[in-house]
Image (tube, rainbow, N blue to C red):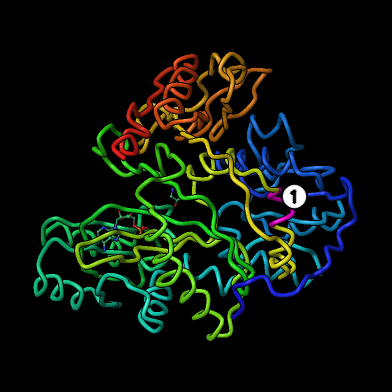
Amino acid sequence: MGRENIGIVRFNQKIGKTMRVLLIGSGGREHALAWKIKQSKLCDKLFCAPGNAGIGQIAECVNIQVEDIAGLLDFADREKIDLTVVGPEIPLSLGIVDEFTRYGLKIFGPSRAAARLEASKIFSKELMAKYKVPTAAFRIFDNLQEAESHIEKIGAPCVIKADGLAAGKGVIVAKTVNEAKQAVIAMMQERLFGESGNRIIIEECLEGQEVSIIVITDSKEVLALASSQDHKRIFDNDSGPNTGGMGAYSPAPIVTNELFKEIMNKVIYPTIDGLAKEGIDYRGVLYAGMMLTKEGLKTLEFNARFGDPETQAILPRLKSDLLEIMLAASEQKLNRIRTLEWDKRFCVCVVCSAGGYPGSYEKGKEIFGLDKAAQMPDVVVFHAGTKLLNNKVITNGGRVLGVTGLGSSIGEAMDKTYAAVREISFQGMHYRHDIGRKALRY
Ligand code: AMP
Ligand code: GLY
């Protein structure tokens, strides 16, 4: 597989703003994608399905849900969309890329078979085992009693994972045998995640710092994005329950050049090559979540999409034209993109969430201070769970905003971001005060 750029493939795209683009999703990640796509020299018109209040300021939002593959296909066909960009995992796992491709519509994202890397943890573990991608030792179970006796045999701590998608809740790091058994019962007997828990994985509990790398690939070429670090716990100092992600910064100093090379050689390339050997062409975003353990680098999971909120911290640093890159990947001509150019500055994204999240929370709270925050230099406010009601922006989800700031040091980026966060308020608003602090140590 040629990793170098061999030969010159002519860039056929007509010069000028010619493309009609459809973006799918409604979170902070999608607002960051919309913001970046809108800056592309190729983008003439941007639609987003279904979008949010912030996306609505820069794109035309259309009320089609992300699961409605037929509706999205119909819209893309009718509106003569040149490229569709898929944000979340659900439409990928439902085969949106296969459907669009079947009708000759260009789309950026992996096929259903390729997206199984995220949609089926068993598929992903078996692929890693087969192609010697380092990962935690594991066993697969489809029988409750056998799973329970395995837990008794290996003891705690151990990690229980539902095979299928579970809105980020399908992984339980169990500290006791009892907790592990409860997790297995919830998944296999009480069917907490429906069919996603038909089969489960019980794996070795790893310890160490988590790192992630996100790449764009067309299965032949791979372009890595700048490193980033997510913060999954709700409270400062990584305490409290897991969330979808409460903030991120980029670059992540923990990812040294040496570690980056190791990640590419041990995880990213063997995974993409392994899929190719299985007859699966991976085109789109590949996100590898890993842990640096005493025994070395181990892979925790793959996602078949951009991370949220990592994207909000990465894209403000990307100088290259993202739309051009995504178009090239979808045409399997990624070799026409030489390198990615980055702003050397640091970027911090702080998520403002609704009171109660990740548990139950209220919606419909008016958000104040958005304009003032957005006017601050080097600050962008990405919307996640927001909507417009009577010309007022109100909360409409658990993660509400991703306030993002750039600075020449991580400290400056933190200062700018937190100054903007302090301009914003809504009833019950919560945010972490320590996003970026870990990077200060380096
Ligand atoms: P995953 O969706 O597989 O990344 O799991 C979500 C989170 O669970 C990860 O970000 C880790 O914090 C944790 N996790 C997953 N697998 C393991 C493991 N084998 N050992 C320890 N923690 C894990
Ligand atoms: N921030 C982790 C994810 O997007 O899955």
Q: At 51% from the left edge and 39% from the top edge, which residue is drawn?
A: 313
| The image quadrant in which ligand 1 is located | bottom left
Amino acid type at image mark 1: Leu
- Residue 337 lies within the magenta run: no
Relative depth, front residue between 1 and 66: 1
Res. 270 in view: yes
Specify the quadrant of the image occupied by residue 252.
top left
Above or below 123: residue 65:
above
Residue 95, x across and y down, in percent: 62, 68
Above or below 105: residue 129:
below
Q: Which residues are magenta?
A: 321-325
- Check the picture and name the quadrant holding the N terminus: bottom right
Residue occupied by mark 1: 22
Residue 27, x across and y down, in percent: 56, 41
- Check the picture and name the quadrant holding the C terminus: top left
Report helix, strand or loop for mark 1. Answer: strand
Residue 408, x across and y down, in percent: 49, 30
Residue 156 horizontal side relative to residue 46, left or right: left
Above or below 284: residue 372:
above
Relative depth, front residue between 302 and 68: 302
Relative depth, front residue between 239 and 312: 312
Q: At 87% from the left edge and 45% from the top edge, which residue is drawn?
A: 17
Mark 1, residues whose alpha carbon is within 10 Å: few (<14), some, or many (≥20)? many
Q: What is the total number of numbered labels drawn onto the structure image?
A: 1
Q: Is mark 1 within 8 Å of ligand 2?
A: no
Residue 197, x across and y down, in percent: 35, 66
Q: At 52% from the left edge and 24% from the top edge, which residue is drawn?
A: 364
Q: What kind of secondary structure does the magenta stretch mostly adopt? A: helix
Above or below 228: residue 135:
below
Res. 89 in view: no
Residue 405 horizontal side relative to residue 72, left or right: left
Q: At 67% from the left edge and 41% from the top edge, which residue is drawn?
A: 36
